[in-house]
Amino acid sequence: MADEHRVPWVLGTQLHPEAGPLGRAPEGSRVLLIEAHDFARRMRYHHQKLTIVFAGMRQFRDELRERGYDVEYVQADTFGDGLETYFERHPDDELVQMRSPSHRSAETFETLVDDAGGSLEVVPNELFVGTREAFDRWANETDREPFKHETFYRWMRRRTGVLMTDDGDPVGGEWNYDDENQEFPPNDWESPPVYEPDHDELTAETSAWVAEEFDTWGADDDLVWPVTRRQAERKLEHFVDVRLPGFGPYQDAMRSDDWAMSHALLGSSINLGLLHPMEAVEAIEAAYHERDDVPLNSVEGVIRQFIGWREFMRHVYRHAMPGLAEANQLSAPHDLPEFYWTGETNMECLRRTVEDVRERGYSHHIQRLMVLANFATLWGVEPSQLNEWFHATYIDAYHWVTTPNVVEMGQYGDGVFASKPYVSSANYIDEMSDYCGDCRYYKTKDTGDRACPFNALYWDFLDRNEERLRSNHRMGLMYSHVDSKQESGEMDDITERVEDLRRTQSHGEL
């Protein structure tokens, strides 16, 4: 087929002009974008999430046209409808598309294109650092543990050469600096300002259209997220110039008056394709080598998120699906509490975190893991319900991202890579946040009136999952405490407290 009939089909999460078939298509080439609306009606998404998805596509359309591309921008209810419209106009075209990371997406799109009377070639996704094939070759080697993040991360460091010496050793002599990145800031510490892009009329019109067209959740104003590549580049520049030095030591800390701390806030831009992850990595590494004010623990900590954790989630997802989406090895039976949507709870940590998500579709990784997922796991929420909530409400969430993060890491749903449940009582939240000081509940009490729910729920979780978890060598110390509480009769009081908490929650008063 002649090149003019081999047309890049760019998905809404692939908005990078230099990646994949689009990056190799000469100016003047035809390019297809389909703005399908049906997905946005399947769940109650955050308003800002839908806004950046649709505005990002519309801005990209206009940018490509300015570059001289012949953009076919089809708005339709479904991808199938959009493809039928396209092939009615261009019956001789062959589409070529970068593979979406979502489960069986390639097969789904191939079927839709075939049904519309066309053909589709699916090619590797160039918006990740590594390839599927390279990971699979490495994972099949002997004596490897492919589903241990640290093992994978070191392989990625060696493979990319990022933060490596000429001798093949990690810069600074250590692979990670987690032990330096778990501090809580002093009272007089202030995080650097957040870069907020100036949005144009097209984005404002898209936001208004989203409000009219869809049943959304969350605030519809104060959009701090990029929708164009230039905005994303500026957000990266701002992070490297202003926010990066303070990222490391306080990256796990949670403050009620600071939703962003010193985090990069680049996840949505990378997951939309506005930035390639290596663009961020290279800028961050360059700052370390060129400046004196950028500590290694900050640099390594954020680079690990991009070439380590994000890439790892991609491979865990594709190897563990479809079972991972419905995994529930602890047989958690309960529904997600309504306060995840309303924020109406007396638990300050949950109230504040849900409010952050409502306002911007964002909270950082420790709030996600040790507040939201921690409580859901202790409560016994069925993992797919929490996964759906994250998918709907977070600005940077997609099924391939949330499923391993939430179902596995957050709720220990499968055991494919998590070695234990990541749960805690109020102690951890108190250590890493200022939430407990303003909370109605007493952080040091396990039972009785106004005892922090996390405490009784924590011991109850260990007690009711004893058969599955006691043999886990990482849980030994905790089960010695469970034994003491069982022998003293304290566990009976804890069980009674949990029953009271469930009654309170059923009345919407927890």
Image (cartoon, rainbow, N blue to C red):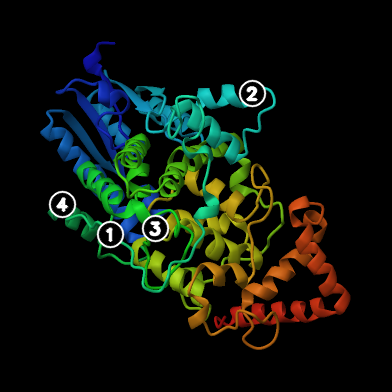
Where disc 3 sits, the SS reads loop
Q: What's the CA distance linking mark 3 and mark 2?
A: 39 Å
For badge 4, the amino acid type reads Leu
Q: Which residue is mark 3?
A: 45
For badge 3, the amino acid type reads Tyr
Which residue shows up at 79% across the image and 54% down it? Answer: 468
Q: Which mark sits nearer the N-terminus, 1 or 2? A: 2
From the viewer's perspective, is the residue at label 1 or at label 3 nearer? 1
Q: Which residue is mark 4?
A: 202
For badge 2, the amino acid type reads Asn
Q: What's the CA distance linking mark 3 and mark 4?
A: 21 Å
- Compared to 466, does 427 lie above or below? below
Q: Which residue is mark 1?
A: 194
Q: Determine whether, in the image, residue 331 is placed left or right of residue 283.
A: right
Query: Can the viewer see residue 35 in this picture?
Result: yes
Q: What's the CA distance linking mark 1 and mark 2?
A: 43 Å
